[in-house]
Amino acid sequence: MSGDLLQKIRETDFFKELSNEALAAVASRASLRKFAPDEALMRKGDAALSFYVILNGHLKIVTTDAKGDEIIINKVGPGETIGELALVDERPRSAGVVALEPVEALELTKEAFFELLDQRLDVSLGILRGFSSRLRFSTTYIEKVIDWSQKTAEGDYSFLEYTQPLLNRAGTDDDKAAQLLSTFYSMVRKVKAREEGLKQQLERLTFEIDQERRKREFEEITGTEFYAKLKEQAQTIRRKRTPDP
Amino acid sequence: MSEGKIVSIHSFRGGTGKSNVTANLAAQVAMTGKRVGVVDTDIQSPGIHVLFGLDDAKMGKTMNDFLHGKATIREIGFSIGENTGGGEGRSKLAGKNLFLFPSSIRGREISQILREGIDFNLLNEGMQTTISEFDLDYLFIDTHPGLNEETLLSIATSDVLIIILRPDNQDLQGTSVTVDVARSLDVPNLFLLVNKALPKYDFAEIKTTIEAQFQAPVTSVLPLSFDLAENASIDLFSLRYPDHEWSKALRNVVDFVLNAK
Protein backbone atom coordinates (compact mmCIF):
# COMPACT_ATOMS: atom_id res chain seq x y z
CA MET A 1 0.00 0.00 0.00
CA SER A 2 1.57 3.29 -1.07
CA GLY A 3 2.04 6.32 1.20
CA ASP A 4 -0.25 8.16 -1.15
CA LEU A 5 -3.05 5.77 -0.36
CA LEU A 6 -2.40 6.00 3.40
CA GLN A 7 -2.58 9.77 3.11
CA LYS A 8 -5.91 9.49 1.33
CA ILE A 9 -7.31 7.24 4.06
CA ARG A 10 -6.12 9.67 6.72
CA GLU A 11 -7.90 12.52 4.96
CA THR A 12 -11.25 10.86 5.59
CA ASP A 13 -13.19 12.09 8.59
CA PHE A 14 -13.70 8.55 9.65
CA PHE A 15 -10.03 7.58 10.01
CA LYS A 16 -8.47 10.93 10.79
CA GLU A 17 -7.87 10.02 14.44
CA LEU A 18 -5.74 6.93 13.63
CA SER A 19 -2.00 6.74 14.08
CA ASN A 20 0.17 5.82 11.07
CA GLU A 21 0.55 2.31 12.35
CA ALA A 22 -3.17 1.86 12.90
CA LEU A 23 -3.81 3.28 9.42
CA ALA A 24 -1.46 0.70 7.96
CA ALA A 25 -3.39 -2.02 9.82
CA VAL A 26 -6.63 -0.78 8.28
CA ALA A 27 -5.09 -0.56 4.83
CA SER A 28 -3.75 -4.09 5.03
CA ARG A 29 -7.22 -5.50 5.56
CA ALA A 30 -8.83 -3.35 2.88
CA SER A 31 -8.98 -4.10 -0.81
CA LEU A 32 -8.87 -1.62 -3.67
CA ARG A 33 -12.03 -1.72 -5.79
CA LYS A 34 -12.70 -0.08 -9.14
CA PHE A 35 -16.16 0.78 -10.41
CA ALA A 36 -17.18 1.73 -13.94
CA PRO A 37 -19.61 4.60 -14.57
CA ASP A 38 -23.20 3.52 -13.75
CA GLU A 39 -21.98 0.54 -11.75
CA ALA A 40 -23.70 0.12 -8.37
CA LEU A 41 -21.64 -0.18 -5.18
CA MET A 42 -24.76 -1.12 -3.27
CA ARG A 43 -28.51 -1.27 -3.76
CA LYS A 44 -31.28 -0.14 -1.46
CA GLY A 45 -32.35 -3.04 0.82
CA ASP A 46 -29.08 -5.00 0.45
CA ALA A 47 -27.57 -6.43 3.60
CA ALA A 48 -24.67 -4.28 4.80
CA LEU A 49 -21.54 -6.39 4.22
CA SER A 50 -18.84 -3.75 3.83
CA PHE A 51 -18.08 -0.08 3.76
CA TYR A 52 -16.09 2.06 1.37
CA VAL A 53 -13.64 4.90 1.49
CA ILE A 54 -13.76 6.82 -1.79
CA LEU A 55 -10.34 7.55 -3.22
CA ASN A 56 -11.18 8.90 -6.67
CA GLY A 57 -14.31 9.82 -8.57
CA HIS A 58 -17.84 10.81 -7.63
CA LEU A 59 -20.95 8.76 -6.90
CA LYS A 60 -24.63 9.42 -6.48
CA ILE A 61 -26.74 8.27 -3.54
CA VAL A 62 -30.09 7.22 -4.95
CA THR A 63 -33.46 5.99 -3.84
CA THR A 64 -36.72 5.45 -5.71
CA ASP A 65 -40.02 7.27 -5.46
CA ALA A 66 -43.50 5.71 -5.27
CA LYS A 67 -43.55 5.25 -9.06
CA GLY A 68 -40.18 3.50 -9.00
CA ASP A 69 -38.30 6.42 -10.60
CA GLU A 70 -34.81 7.17 -9.38
CA ILE A 71 -34.30 10.16 -7.07
CA ILE A 72 -30.78 11.41 -6.39
CA ILE A 73 -30.46 12.25 -2.69
CA ASN A 74 -26.85 13.35 -2.64
CA LYS A 75 -23.47 13.15 -4.31
CA VAL A 76 -20.29 11.96 -2.65
CA GLY A 77 -16.63 12.19 -3.64
CA PRO A 78 -13.01 11.52 -2.60
CA GLY A 79 -12.34 11.40 1.14
CA GLU A 80 -15.90 10.48 2.02
CA THR A 81 -16.97 7.14 3.45
CA ILE A 82 -20.05 5.18 2.47
CA GLY A 83 -21.98 2.66 4.51
CA GLU A 84 -20.09 2.66 7.82
CA LEU A 85 -23.18 3.27 9.95
CA ALA A 86 -24.98 0.24 8.52
CA LEU A 87 -22.07 -1.99 9.57
CA VAL A 88 -22.55 -0.92 13.15
CA ASP A 89 -26.33 -0.92 13.40
CA GLU A 90 -26.74 -3.92 11.03
CA ARG A 91 -29.73 -2.47 9.16
CA PRO A 92 -30.19 -3.02 5.41
CA ARG A 93 -28.94 -0.33 3.02
CA SER A 94 -31.26 2.67 3.14
CA ALA A 95 -30.22 3.90 -0.29
CA GLY A 96 -28.32 2.77 -3.36
CA VAL A 97 -24.93 4.12 -4.45
CA VAL A 98 -23.96 4.33 -8.13
CA ALA A 99 -20.73 5.53 -9.72
CA LEU A 100 -21.05 8.67 -11.84
CA GLU A 101 -17.59 8.22 -13.37
CA PRO A 102 -14.71 5.74 -12.97
CA VAL A 103 -14.39 5.35 -9.20
CA GLU A 104 -11.64 3.94 -7.02
CA ALA A 105 -12.60 2.99 -3.49
CA LEU A 106 -11.15 1.10 -0.60
CA GLU A 107 -13.46 -1.64 0.57
CA LEU A 108 -13.40 -2.85 4.15
CA THR A 109 -15.61 -5.89 4.68
CA LYS A 110 -17.72 -6.31 7.77
CA GLU A 111 -15.45 -9.20 8.90
CA ALA A 112 -12.31 -7.14 8.43
CA PHE A 113 -13.91 -4.21 10.24
CA PHE A 114 -14.93 -6.25 13.28
CA GLU A 115 -11.62 -8.08 13.28
CA LEU A 116 -9.86 -4.74 13.51
CA LEU A 117 -12.16 -3.67 16.32
CA ASP A 118 -11.50 -6.93 18.14
CA GLN A 119 -7.75 -7.08 17.75
CA ARG A 120 -6.62 -3.50 17.76
CA LEU A 121 -7.68 -1.37 20.66
CA ASP A 122 -5.89 1.62 19.12
CA VAL A 123 -7.88 1.24 15.88
CA SER A 124 -11.12 0.79 17.85
CA LEU A 125 -10.48 3.89 19.90
CA GLY A 126 -9.48 5.85 16.81
CA ILE A 127 -12.68 4.84 15.05
CA LEU A 128 -14.75 5.62 18.16
CA ARG A 129 -13.09 9.00 18.41
CA GLY A 130 -13.95 9.59 14.77
CA PHE A 131 -17.59 8.75 15.45
CA SER A 132 -17.65 10.88 18.61
CA SER A 133 -16.06 13.93 17.08
CA ARG A 134 -18.50 13.86 14.15
CA LEU A 135 -21.39 13.49 16.55
CA ARG A 136 -20.19 16.24 18.87
CA PHE A 137 -19.52 18.56 15.98
CA SER A 138 -23.00 17.92 14.60
CA THR A 139 -24.68 18.31 17.99
CA THR A 140 -22.93 21.59 18.70
CA TYR A 141 -24.00 23.03 15.40
CA ILE A 142 -27.52 21.68 15.66
CA GLU A 143 -27.80 23.50 19.00
CA LYS A 144 -26.43 26.66 17.41
CA VAL A 145 -28.81 26.38 14.48
CA ILE A 146 -31.77 25.91 16.84
CA ASP A 147 -30.72 29.02 18.77
CA TRP A 148 -30.23 31.08 15.60
CA SER A 149 -33.49 29.81 14.09
CA GLN A 150 -35.33 31.15 17.12
CA LYS A 151 -33.53 34.48 16.79
CA THR A 152 -34.36 34.62 13.06
CA ALA A 153 -38.01 33.91 13.80
CA GLU A 154 -38.00 36.91 16.12
CA GLY A 155 -36.33 39.11 13.52
CA ASP A 156 -33.01 39.28 15.40
CA TYR A 157 -30.22 38.86 12.83
CA SER A 158 -27.39 40.23 15.00
CA PHE A 159 -25.71 36.82 15.28
CA LEU A 160 -24.80 37.06 11.58
CA GLU A 161 -22.05 39.57 12.42
CA TYR A 162 -20.47 37.98 15.44
CA THR A 163 -20.58 34.36 14.31
CA GLN A 164 -19.61 34.81 10.67
CA PRO A 165 -15.84 34.67 11.42
CA LEU A 166 -16.37 31.44 13.40
CA LEU A 167 -17.99 29.83 10.40
CA ASN A 168 -15.03 30.57 8.18
CA ARG A 169 -12.81 28.60 10.56
CA ALA A 170 -15.34 25.85 11.09
CA GLY A 171 -14.16 23.35 8.56
CA THR A 172 -13.66 22.32 5.03
CA ASP A 173 -16.18 22.52 2.24
CA ASP A 174 -17.00 18.85 2.31
CA ASP A 175 -17.82 19.06 5.99
CA LYS A 176 -21.58 18.49 6.22
CA ALA A 177 -22.02 20.62 9.34
CA ALA A 178 -20.20 23.49 7.67
CA GLN A 179 -22.42 23.05 4.61
CA LEU A 180 -25.51 23.18 6.82
CA LEU A 181 -24.27 26.36 8.44
CA SER A 182 -23.34 27.95 5.19
CA THR A 183 -26.80 27.15 3.75
CA PHE A 184 -28.40 28.40 6.95
CA TYR A 185 -26.46 31.68 6.81
CA SER A 186 -27.33 32.19 3.21
CA MET A 187 -31.01 31.58 4.06
CA VAL A 188 -30.94 34.07 6.94
CA ARG A 189 -29.18 36.69 4.83
CA LYS A 190 -31.83 36.32 2.13
CA VAL A 191 -34.68 36.48 4.65
CA LYS A 192 -33.12 39.60 6.15
CA ALA A 193 -32.67 41.23 2.73
CA ARG A 194 -36.24 40.42 1.75
CA GLU A 195 -37.58 41.81 4.98
CA GLU A 196 -35.60 45.03 4.52
CA GLY A 197 -36.78 45.30 0.92
CA LEU A 198 -40.37 44.86 2.00
CA LYS A 199 -39.99 47.49 4.71
CA GLN A 200 -38.69 49.96 2.13
CA GLN A 201 -41.58 49.26 -0.21
CA LEU A 202 -44.12 49.59 2.54
CA GLU A 203 -42.54 52.85 3.59
CA ARG A 204 -43.18 54.15 0.09
CA LEU A 205 -46.75 52.99 0.50
CA THR A 206 -47.31 54.89 3.71
CA PHE A 207 -50.26 57.00 2.79
CA GLU A 208 -50.74 60.49 4.02
CA ILE A 209 -53.97 62.36 3.74
CA ASP A 210 -53.98 66.10 4.18
CA GLN A 211 -56.98 66.36 6.50
CA GLU A 212 -57.24 70.16 6.20
CA ARG A 213 -57.50 69.91 2.45
CA ARG A 214 -59.95 67.03 2.72
CA LYS A 215 -62.23 69.11 4.92
CA ARG A 216 -61.91 72.19 2.73
CA GLU A 217 -62.76 70.30 -0.48
CA PHE A 218 -65.66 68.54 1.18
CA GLU A 219 -67.08 71.87 2.29
CA GLU A 220 -66.61 73.38 -1.17
CA ILE A 221 -68.69 70.59 -2.70
CA THR A 222 -71.36 70.29 -0.06
CA GLY A 223 -71.73 74.02 0.52
CA THR A 224 -73.62 74.70 -2.71
CA GLU A 225 -77.31 75.10 -3.26
CA PHE A 226 -77.15 72.30 -5.82
CA TYR A 227 -75.79 69.93 -3.19
CA ALA A 228 -78.43 70.81 -0.62
CA LYS A 229 -81.13 70.10 -3.18
CA LEU A 230 -79.43 66.91 -4.27
CA LYS A 231 -79.17 65.59 -0.71
CA GLU A 232 -82.86 66.21 -0.24
CA GLN A 233 -83.72 64.58 -3.58
CA ALA A 234 -81.45 61.60 -2.94
CA GLN A 235 -83.48 60.63 0.08
CA THR A 236 -86.73 60.89 -1.88
CA ILE A 237 -85.32 58.95 -4.84
CA ARG A 238 -84.05 56.10 -2.69
CA ARG A 239 -87.24 55.99 -0.65
CA LYS A 240 -89.20 55.78 -3.90
CA ARG A 241 -87.14 52.87 -5.16
CA THR A 242 -87.24 50.87 -1.97
CA PRO A 243 -89.84 48.15 -2.46
CA ASP A 244 -93.03 48.62 -0.48
CA PRO A 245 -93.23 46.36 2.52
CA MET B 1 -91.53 49.44 -8.19
CA SER B 2 -88.36 47.78 -9.43
CA GLU B 3 -85.86 46.29 -7.04
CA GLY B 4 -82.96 46.80 -9.42
CA LYS B 5 -79.88 48.33 -7.85
CA ILE B 6 -77.82 51.21 -9.13
CA VAL B 7 -74.10 50.51 -8.91
CA SER B 8 -71.98 53.59 -9.57
CA ILE B 9 -68.32 53.15 -10.39
CA HIS B 10 -66.30 56.22 -9.65
CA SER B 11 -62.77 57.45 -9.34
CA PHE B 12 -61.55 60.84 -8.24
CA ARG B 13 -58.86 61.05 -10.89
CA GLY B 14 -58.70 59.74 -14.43
CA GLY B 15 -56.57 56.79 -15.50
CA THR B 16 -57.58 54.44 -12.73
CA GLY B 17 -58.95 51.92 -15.24
CA LYS B 18 -62.51 52.73 -14.26
CA SER B 19 -64.22 51.96 -17.58
CA ASN B 20 -62.32 48.71 -17.86
CA VAL B 21 -63.30 47.63 -14.36
CA THR B 22 -66.91 48.69 -14.92
CA ALA B 23 -67.25 46.78 -18.19
CA ASN B 24 -65.61 43.63 -16.83
CA LEU B 25 -67.51 43.73 -13.56
CA ALA B 26 -70.86 44.25 -15.32
CA ALA B 27 -70.01 41.36 -17.65
CA GLN B 28 -69.07 39.10 -14.72
CA VAL B 29 -72.34 39.89 -12.95
CA ALA B 30 -74.25 39.21 -16.19
CA MET B 31 -72.44 35.86 -16.42
CA THR B 32 -74.08 34.84 -13.12
CA GLY B 33 -77.45 35.12 -14.90
CA LYS B 34 -78.45 38.55 -13.59
CA ARG B 35 -80.01 41.17 -15.87
CA VAL B 36 -77.46 43.94 -16.12
CA GLY B 37 -77.30 47.38 -17.70
CA VAL B 38 -74.32 49.70 -18.18
CA VAL B 39 -74.87 53.44 -18.59
CA ASP B 40 -72.06 55.61 -19.79
CA THR B 41 -72.65 58.92 -18.05
CA ASP B 42 -69.14 60.04 -18.82
CA ILE B 43 -70.62 62.33 -21.42
CA GLN B 44 -67.47 64.45 -21.67
CA SER B 45 -65.23 61.53 -22.54
CA PRO B 46 -67.22 58.37 -23.23
CA GLY B 47 -65.24 55.19 -23.73
CA ILE B 48 -66.83 52.10 -22.31
CA HIS B 49 -68.62 51.22 -25.60
CA VAL B 50 -65.26 50.24 -27.13
CA LEU B 51 -64.86 47.44 -24.60
CA PHE B 52 -68.24 46.11 -25.66
CA GLY B 53 -67.24 46.13 -29.31
CA LEU B 54 -69.39 49.07 -30.29
CA ASP B 55 -68.07 51.65 -32.75
CA ASP B 56 -69.41 54.84 -34.27
CA ALA B 57 -70.96 52.95 -37.20
CA LYS B 58 -72.83 50.47 -35.00
CA MET B 59 -73.91 53.00 -32.41
CA GLY B 60 -77.57 53.94 -32.68
CA LYS B 61 -79.38 56.28 -30.32
CA THR B 62 -77.42 57.48 -27.30
CA MET B 63 -77.92 58.94 -23.84
CA ASN B 64 -77.39 62.36 -25.46
CA ASP B 65 -80.48 61.78 -27.64
CA PHE B 66 -82.44 60.83 -24.55
CA LEU B 67 -81.34 63.96 -22.70
CA HIS B 68 -82.43 66.02 -25.68
CA GLY B 69 -85.80 64.33 -25.73
CA LYS B 70 -85.00 62.71 -29.08
CA ALA B 71 -85.06 59.08 -27.99
CA THR B 72 -86.63 56.80 -25.41
CA ILE B 73 -84.61 54.57 -23.10
CA ARG B 74 -86.02 51.54 -24.91
CA GLU B 75 -84.44 52.78 -28.15
CA ILE B 76 -81.02 53.34 -26.59
CA GLY B 77 -80.47 49.97 -24.93
CA PHE B 78 -78.01 47.92 -26.96
CA SER B 79 -78.13 44.19 -26.24
CA ILE B 80 -74.59 42.85 -25.88
CA GLY B 81 -75.95 39.31 -25.46
CA GLU B 82 -77.35 39.52 -28.99
CA ASN B 83 -74.44 41.46 -30.50
CA THR B 84 -71.21 40.37 -28.90
CA GLY B 85 -69.36 41.98 -31.79
CA GLY B 86 -66.53 39.44 -32.03
CA GLY B 87 -63.85 39.10 -29.41
CA GLU B 88 -63.11 35.76 -27.80
CA GLY B 89 -64.00 37.04 -24.32
CA ARG B 90 -67.14 38.93 -25.32
CA SER B 91 -68.52 35.94 -27.23
CA LYS B 92 -69.06 34.25 -23.84
CA LEU B 93 -71.78 36.83 -23.19
CA ALA B 94 -73.95 35.43 -26.00
CA GLY B 95 -77.47 34.90 -24.68
CA LYS B 96 -76.78 36.81 -21.46
CA ASN B 97 -78.87 39.81 -20.43
CA LEU B 98 -76.43 42.66 -20.67
CA PHE B 99 -77.45 46.02 -22.12
CA LEU B 100 -75.30 49.02 -22.88
CA PHE B 101 -76.64 52.58 -22.82
CA PRO B 102 -73.88 54.49 -24.58
CA SER B 103 -73.04 58.17 -24.67
CA SER B 104 -72.52 59.85 -27.99
CA ILE B 105 -68.97 60.01 -29.22
CA ARG B 106 -69.79 62.71 -31.76
CA GLY B 107 -67.95 65.90 -30.85
CA ARG B 108 -70.83 68.18 -31.75
CA GLU B 109 -73.26 66.32 -29.51
CA ILE B 110 -70.76 66.28 -26.65
CA SER B 111 -70.19 70.01 -26.83
CA GLN B 112 -73.92 70.62 -27.13
CA ILE B 113 -74.64 68.83 -23.89
CA LEU B 114 -71.76 70.57 -22.15
CA ARG B 115 -73.04 73.92 -23.35
CA GLU B 116 -76.64 73.36 -22.43
CA GLY B 117 -76.05 71.42 -19.26
CA ILE B 118 -77.72 68.23 -18.20
CA ASP B 119 -81.29 68.05 -17.04
CA PHE B 120 -80.67 66.17 -13.82
CA ASN B 121 -84.24 65.24 -13.22
CA LEU B 122 -84.40 63.77 -16.70
CA LEU B 123 -81.14 61.87 -16.22
CA ASN B 124 -82.37 60.52 -12.91
CA GLU B 125 -85.70 59.56 -14.42
CA GLY B 126 -83.82 57.92 -17.26
CA MET B 127 -81.95 55.68 -14.84
CA GLN B 128 -85.13 54.64 -13.04
CA THR B 129 -86.81 53.97 -16.40
CA THR B 130 -83.81 51.95 -17.57
CA ILE B 131 -84.14 49.64 -14.58
CA SER B 132 -87.88 49.16 -14.93
CA GLU B 133 -88.11 48.93 -18.76
CA PHE B 134 -85.29 46.39 -19.00
CA ASP B 135 -86.23 44.70 -15.75
CA LEU B 136 -82.66 45.03 -14.54
CA ASP B 137 -81.17 43.53 -11.42
CA TYR B 138 -78.19 45.88 -11.62
CA LEU B 139 -77.54 49.11 -13.47
CA PHE B 140 -73.86 50.00 -13.59
CA ILE B 141 -73.01 53.65 -14.06
CA ASP B 142 -69.64 54.56 -15.48
CA THR B 143 -69.14 58.09 -14.15
CA HIS B 144 -66.87 60.92 -15.14
CA PRO B 145 -63.81 61.26 -12.86
CA GLY B 146 -63.93 63.97 -10.23
CA LEU B 147 -66.95 65.29 -8.40
CA ASN B 148 -68.89 67.32 -10.91
CA GLU B 149 -72.66 67.65 -10.74
CA GLU B 150 -73.64 64.65 -12.86
CA THR B 151 -71.26 62.49 -10.87
CA LEU B 152 -72.72 63.76 -7.60
CA LEU B 153 -76.14 62.88 -8.95
CA SER B 154 -75.16 59.31 -9.73
CA ILE B 155 -73.55 58.96 -6.30
CA ALA B 156 -76.69 60.38 -4.69
CA THR B 157 -78.93 57.86 -6.40
CA SER B 158 -76.73 54.79 -6.13
CA ASP B 159 -77.36 51.82 -3.89
CA VAL B 160 -73.79 50.68 -4.29
CA LEU B 161 -70.84 52.98 -4.86
CA ILE B 162 -67.52 51.48 -5.84
CA ILE B 163 -64.65 53.94 -5.68
CA ILE B 164 -61.63 52.89 -7.70
CA LEU B 165 -58.24 54.18 -6.66
CA ARG B 166 -54.61 53.50 -7.32
CA PRO B 167 -52.42 52.97 -4.27
CA ASP B 168 -50.87 56.43 -4.24
CA ASN B 169 -51.24 59.57 -2.17
CA GLN B 170 -53.01 61.69 -4.78
CA ASP B 171 -55.70 59.09 -5.36
CA LEU B 172 -56.10 58.59 -1.62
CA GLN B 173 -56.49 62.29 -1.03
CA GLY B 174 -59.23 62.56 -3.65
CA THR B 175 -60.88 59.37 -2.50
CA SER B 176 -61.09 60.72 1.04
CA VAL B 177 -63.30 63.56 -0.18
CA THR B 178 -65.46 61.20 -2.26
CA VAL B 179 -65.89 58.90 0.74
CA ASP B 180 -67.01 61.83 2.89
CA VAL B 181 -69.45 62.98 0.22
CA ALA B 182 -70.85 59.46 -0.24
CA ARG B 183 -71.41 59.19 3.52
CA SER B 184 -73.06 62.58 3.56
CA LEU B 185 -75.38 61.36 0.78
CA ASP B 186 -76.15 58.18 2.75
CA VAL B 187 -74.99 55.73 0.07
CA PRO B 188 -76.03 52.37 1.57
CA ASN B 189 -73.07 50.31 0.27
CA LEU B 190 -69.73 52.03 0.00
CA PHE B 191 -66.93 49.89 -1.41
CA LEU B 192 -63.35 50.60 -2.43
CA LEU B 193 -61.41 48.86 -5.17
CA VAL B 194 -57.68 49.27 -5.62
CA ASN B 195 -56.46 48.96 -9.19
CA LYS B 196 -53.02 49.12 -10.80
CA ALA B 197 -51.12 47.99 -7.71
CA LEU B 198 -47.52 47.13 -8.54
CA PRO B 199 -47.17 43.36 -8.08
CA LYS B 200 -44.10 43.81 -5.84
CA TYR B 201 -46.20 45.38 -3.10
CA ASP B 202 -47.87 43.47 -0.32
CA PHE B 203 -51.52 43.48 -1.44
CA ALA B 204 -52.83 42.37 1.96
CA GLU B 205 -51.03 45.32 3.52
CA ILE B 206 -52.50 47.74 0.97
CA LYS B 207 -55.97 46.39 1.70
CA THR B 208 -55.73 46.69 5.47
CA THR B 209 -54.09 50.13 5.36
CA ILE B 210 -56.74 51.58 3.08
CA GLU B 211 -59.60 49.92 4.93
CA ALA B 212 -58.30 51.36 8.19
CA GLN B 213 -57.96 54.79 6.58
CA PHE B 214 -61.55 54.95 5.31
CA GLN B 215 -63.47 52.46 7.44
CA ALA B 216 -64.88 50.93 4.26
CA PRO B 217 -64.25 47.50 2.73
CA VAL B 218 -61.65 47.15 -0.02
CA THR B 219 -63.33 44.60 -2.29
CA SER B 220 -60.15 43.66 -4.09
CA VAL B 221 -56.63 44.79 -4.96
CA LEU B 222 -56.04 44.40 -8.69
CA PRO B 223 -52.49 44.24 -10.02
CA LEU B 224 -51.06 46.59 -12.61
CA SER B 225 -50.95 44.40 -15.67
CA PHE B 226 -49.24 44.92 -18.99
CA ASP B 227 -51.26 42.04 -20.40
CA LEU B 228 -54.37 44.00 -19.60
CA ALA B 229 -53.00 47.23 -21.04
CA GLU B 230 -52.22 45.47 -24.30
CA ASN B 231 -55.61 43.85 -24.60
CA ALA B 232 -57.92 46.21 -22.81
CA SER B 233 -59.56 48.15 -25.55
CA ILE B 234 -60.13 45.17 -27.80
CA ASP B 235 -62.00 42.72 -25.61
CA LEU B 236 -63.31 42.03 -22.13
CA PHE B 237 -60.12 40.85 -20.49
CA SER B 238 -61.61 38.92 -17.56
CA LEU B 239 -63.72 36.82 -19.92
CA ARG B 240 -60.92 36.25 -22.37
CA TYR B 241 -58.28 35.37 -19.76
CA PRO B 242 -60.31 34.07 -16.79
CA ASP B 243 -57.23 32.55 -15.11
CA HIS B 244 -55.15 35.75 -15.15
CA GLU B 245 -54.39 37.30 -11.72
CA TRP B 246 -56.23 40.47 -12.65
CA SER B 247 -59.35 38.53 -13.67
CA LYS B 248 -59.32 36.45 -10.49
CA ALA B 249 -58.99 39.57 -8.35
CA LEU B 250 -61.80 41.26 -10.27
CA ARG B 251 -64.14 38.33 -9.64
CA ASN B 252 -63.71 38.95 -5.88
CA VAL B 253 -65.77 42.10 -6.36
CA VAL B 254 -68.77 40.24 -7.84
CA ASP B 255 -69.88 38.82 -4.50
CA PHE B 256 -69.77 42.27 -2.88
CA VAL B 257 -72.18 43.51 -5.54
CA LEU B 258 -74.45 40.48 -5.37
CA ASN B 259 -74.62 40.55 -1.57
CA ALA B 260 -75.19 44.30 -1.22
CA LYS B 261 -78.43 45.04 0.57
Image: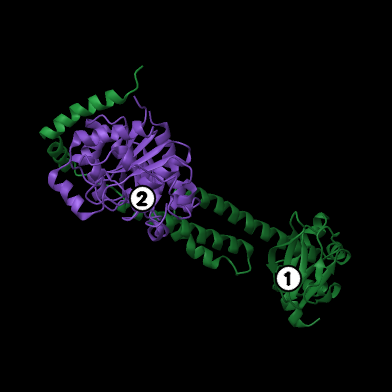
SS class, disc 2: helix
User: As shown in the figure, which amino acid type bears the numbered disc 2?
Assistant: Asn
Chain letter, colour green in render: A
Task: Provide the residue designation for mark 1.
Answer: A59
Residue drawn at 70 percent across, 72 percent down = A79
Q: A23 or A44, which lies in front?
A: A44
Task: Provide the residue designation for mark 2.
Answer: B20
* Image quarter hosting the N terminus of chain B: top left
The x and y percentages for residue A222 are 15, 35
- Is residue A156 in sight in this rendering? no
B37 left or right, relative to A30 = left
User: As shown in the figure, which amino acid type bears the numbered disc 1?
Assistant: Leu
Mark 1 burial class by Cα count in 10 Å: few <14, some 14-19, many 20+: many
Q: A2 or B113, which lies in front?
A: B113
The x and y percentages for residue B20 are 36, 50
Q: Chain of mark 2?
A: B
Q: A125 or A225, which lies in front?
A: A225
B156 left or right, relative to A197 = left
The x and y percentages for residue B24 are 40, 47
